[in-house]
Image (tube, rainbow, N blue to C red):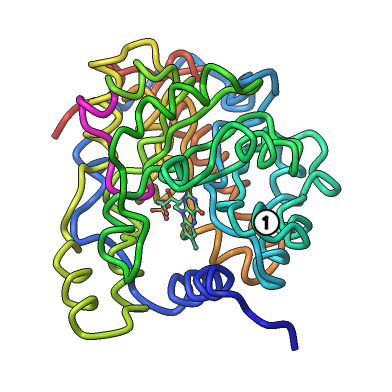
Amino acid sequence: MRKVAPIDQRKADHIKINLEQDVRSAISSGLENYHFIHEALPELDLNRVDTTLSLFGKKLNSPILISSMTGGTDEAEAINFRLAEAAQECGVAMGVGSQRAAIENPEQAKTFQVRRVAPEILLFANLGAVQLNYGYGIDQCRKAVDMIGADALILHLNPLQEAVQDAGDTNFADLAKKIEEVCKKIEVPVIAKEVGWGISARTARLLADCGVSAIDVAGAGGTSWSQVEMHRAPDEFTRELAATFVGWGISTAESILNVKKNVPEMTIFASGGIKDGLDIAKCIALGATLGGMAGQFLKAAAISTGQVVERIKLMKRQIEVTMFASGVGTLKGLELGKLANL
Ligand SMILES: Cc1cc2nc3c(=O)[nH]c(=O)nc-3n(C[C@H](O)[C@H](O)[C@H](O)COP(=O)(O)O)c2cc1C
């Protein structure tokens, strides 16, 4: 049997815990506080409602993102390929999970290399930004992008996750200037992304100053990484530390508005507790371009490609019906004025 290195073990734990345990945040996405103003006379043909968009040079059939999750193990490879097949069939975007394992262990690259089944999708590479303080630089960032033929690079920000785990990488000092350097040198757009605790006004401005092309707010309201770490804690001290933060973070709705108000031109991806296409439509009306989901797609991909396709089709229809009943024919028409705040 192949020896499982600690980084692989971590990835395997993440999948297992996310599939088997309740790891939801104690706070909600905030999207339930908004509803669309119903239009009884929409003056639209439902069959002509248009959910297509162009982003980073790629055309998408709908504003749906399969959020960054996994890679590195045989099980993760199967999940990545199912997600990618579904993304290709449905014309949506996808991110792979952190590629650090494959940078350090090149034979794992194949578990991330989904272009074989998804030649046309908008595809995002992924590395932890904090690795820029642990010996990584532009070379590793380029390797991650080249490894999978990505259209853009996601640098994820997960300070709390690192802080509540045993032996996490917790030196986040002076990281902004290193992110800025990557943005300046790399040939593809850079996206900064949280992992489930959201983006404040200060962080939004700081990231904009670094020169990122987009921010995925990954707000609180869905998967809580302190809960995931709680379930894999090696001792009671670490378990209690992680459990403390079940209600931490900035909700997804608030995070979108923080970016929109402070950096109006920034491209925003929304994720964190998004349930369905109606939630995605709300995020777009608040200012986002794409709505991403992780936990939900993981559960579908654990079953089959077909399950992922079915989920995406339902979400696309939910977005179309929301737009239709709100009197909006194109994504550009989904704006703040279409929403009422409860
Ligand atoms: C199993 C799993 C693994 C994840 N791994 C990564 C990762 O490697 N890199 C990353 O940026 N985010 C990662 N995430 C975070 C998600 O991309 C997403 O931001 C977060 O889970 C919130 O979305 P959700 O509430 O729909 O799950 C992971 C999420 C899950 C469920």
Residue 28: horizontal and vertical position, in percent?
A: 22, 52
Residue 340 sits in quarter: top left
Total tally of numbered discs in the picture = 1
**What's the residue at 41%, 45% (across, down)?**
130
In the orientation shown, which residue stands out farthest toward the right?
A: 116
Work out whether 134 lies above or below 307: above
Q: Quadrant of the N terminus?
A: bottom right
The residue pinned by badge 1 equals: 102
Please provide the residue range marked out in magenta: 195-204
- Residue 217, magenta (yes or no): no
Q: Main secondary structure of the magenta part?
A: loop
Look at the image and tell me whether residue 144 can be seen.
yes
Q: Is mark 1 on a helix, strand or loop?
A: helix
Residue 26: horizontal and vertical position, in percent?
A: 19, 61
**What's the residue at 78%, 57% (across, down)?**
110
In this orientation, which residue lies closer to the viewer: 139 or 204? 139
Work out whether 221 lies above or below 244: above
Q: Is mark 1 within 8 Å of ligand 1?
A: no
In the orientation shown, which residue stands out farthest toward the bottom?
A: 1
Work out whether 146 lies above or below 257: below
Look at the image and tell me whether residue 39 can be seen.
no
- In the drawing, does residue 222 fall left or right of residue 81? left
